Amino acid sequence: MSNDIFFLAEFADGAPQRSALELAAGATELAAASGGNVVALAYGPGAGDGAAGLGAHGVARAIVLRDDAAPAITAGPAAVEAVRAASPLAVLAPATPNGRDLAAALVGLADLPAFGPVRAVRVVDGIVETEQATLQGSVVTTSRPVDGAPQPSVVLVLANTFTPTEAGSGTAEVSRAEASDHPFTLATIVESHPADAAVVNLEEATVIVAGGRGIGSAEGFGQLDELAAALGGAVGASRAAADAGWVPYQLQIGQTGKVVKPALYIGLGISGAIQHRVGMQTAEHVIAVNKDPDAPIGEFADLFVVGDLFQIVPKLTAEIRRRKG
Ligand SMILES: Cc1cc2nc3c(=O)[nH]c(=O)nc-3n(C[C@H](O)[C@H](O)[C@H](O)COP(=O)(O)OP(=O)(O)OC[C@H]3O[C@@H](n4cnc5c(N)ncnc54)[C@H](O)[C@@H]3O)c2cc1C
């Protein structure tokens, strides 16, 4: 058994995804408390080329599980081998669709204790401790593995729990997992296209484009779908928009809706009432577009654009698409 902290590091086109950089920061924090090393289990297209670069984010070693475009779950058997060989204290997994799949495969194939999705994880006296919000955030539970539980604990970590560190200069030592013929590996992706923004889980979204009464109709939300898709984000709403039936209640942010913590929240046609604000005030950056210069959201937005959202949003979406090529 070791005190190392492993984490699942997802790659696309050779670059670590934001979830990987967040978990590298989290694993570094935990490893400082446990006295172990930080080890990445890298997967996804180009992971083999990009894994060494994780060294710039505190990662000592990276094990490339797979670096093709196969479903994440197919990396499960390789993850099990890597974890069995080192018996780390914890494996942090991002609470993304791929992260959940791979974490579930790891837990199920290796019979390990599982936690999450959590908003906090730490090492206390050599033991992994997690905090999870339940019942719409009204109750916070603290959990640990029981005495004698097998190591590692596998912990699903919600987006934005940790903040990526600035890149330093290190390089991770990279090794490759042995190819496996386990039945889990026998699935392949035949086609992929960008997901419908509306199905992205709001609480896990890194970017949220939220609309309020100012959107005016269900059709008006189509523009928000497009902006969210261009940014790789999710659409949210105020209660006024949900009450009007323009979007389902699952998209409502606020006191009686979801509590979100994206890196970027864009509020369009939302006044910023306190009941909405309590659901999004921990967003890292807030941009608001409102035609009323005195709208309360202007008081706490980092960038407050006074203008007609119907003039601004299409141009913004087009410009983002142009820059993304
Ligand atoms: C117990 C309780 C619980 C509540 N829970 C929630 C909750 O969970 N979530 C929530 O959101 N609310 C909640 N509310 C309601 C809350 O008080 C507000 O009524 C609601 O947030 C207002 O929604 P809004 O900002 O979309 O609408 P409004 O306050 O009507 O604001 C619409 C904004 O759009 C702007 N606008 C209009 N047209 C344009 C345009 N073309 N371009 C740019 N800007 C434009 C206007 O200037 C205005 O500022 C709750 C209320 C109560 C009493």
Image (cartoon, grey):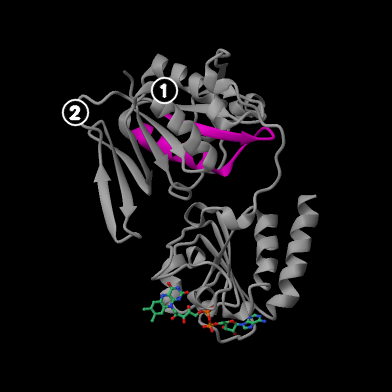
Q: Is mark 1 within 8 Å of ligand 1?
A: no
Judging depth in this view, the residue of 300 and 46 nearest the camera is 46
Q: Label 2 is placed on what type of residue?
A: Asp
Residue 97 against residue 77 in the figure, above or below: below
Judging depth in this view, the residue of 117 and 104 nearest the camera is 104
Query: Number of numbered discs present?
Result: 2
Residue placed at 51% from the left, 44% from the top?
164
Q: Which numbered disc, 1 or 2, marks the residue closer to the eye?
A: 1
Q: Position of residue 31 (x, y in %)?
A: 37, 32
- Disc 2 target residue: 147
- In the image, is residue 21 part of the stretch drawn in magenta? yes
Residue placed at 46% from the left, 66% from the top?
280
- Disc 1 target residue: 109
Residue 93 lies in quadrant = top left
At numbered mark 2, what does the secondary structure look like: helix, strand or loop? loop
Residue placed at 33% from the left, 20% from the top?
2
Question: Which disc number belongs to residue 301?
Answer: none
Disc 1 and disc 2 in contact, CB within 8 angstroms: no
Q: Position of residue 172 (x, y in %)?
A: 55, 24
Residue 287 lies in quadrant = bottom right
- In the image, is residue 286 part of the stretch drawn in magenta? no
Q: Is residue 17 left or right of residue 28?
A: right
Marks 1/2: CA–CA distance: 21 Å
Q: Position of residue 22 (x, y in %)?
A: 49, 43
Image quadrant occupied by the N terminus: top left
Q: Position of residue 184 (x, y in %)?
A: 53, 22
Q: Label 1 is placed on what type of residue?
A: Leu
For residue 16, say whether it is visible. yes
For residue 5, say whether it is visible. no
- Magenta-highlighted residues: 6-32
